[in-house]
Image (spheres, grey):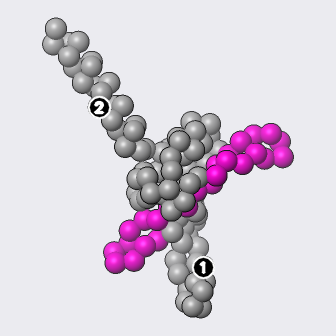
Amino acid sequence: MIDALVAGKLYAKPQPHTAKNGNTFATAKVRAAAGEEALFVNVIAFEAGVVSALLALDAGDSLALTGSATPKVWTAKDGTARPALDVVAAQVLTPYHVTRKRAAVGASTRQTED
């Protein structure tokens, strides 16, 4: 297992799923820049907060996520082997979260100045 921090853009809208035991989870595909090429990261999230953060996003939205990663290889249509990464997401950070945190910090700073 590799601890990973991945930043990129959602390749498609995250999908909600329900396990046989009734628990919900989400899957997503993130396109992360890797030099001149892109690395596709297959993401799965089980924790409720991470699931809801992913499902609030849409294709093309930027995000950063942390979690445990497993390197993989997939074969493209032209037959070439391409790298990929499977990540079980533990946390998700989006521009919405950053904006909300900045507003909270700004509000608490203004309160202490008054």
In the image, residue 27 above or below residue 90: below
Residue on which disc 1 sits: 74
Q: Which mark is residue 102?
A: 2
Visible residue check, residue 109 = yes
Left or right: 3, with 106 as reference point? right
Q: Is residue 31 magenta?
A: yes
Above or below, comparing residue 55 to residue 74 in the picture: above
The residue positioned 80% from the left and 39% from the top of the image is: 22
| Extreme-bottom residue of the structure | 79
Q: Disc 1 to disc 2, how far (Cα)?
A: 39 Å
Residue under the point 16% across and 8% down = 114
Total tally of numbered discs in the picture: 2
Dominant SS type (magenta): strand
Q: In the image, which residues are magenta?
A: 15-39
Question: From what the image shows, is residue 2 above or below residue 57?
Answer: below
Q: Residue furthest top?
A: 114
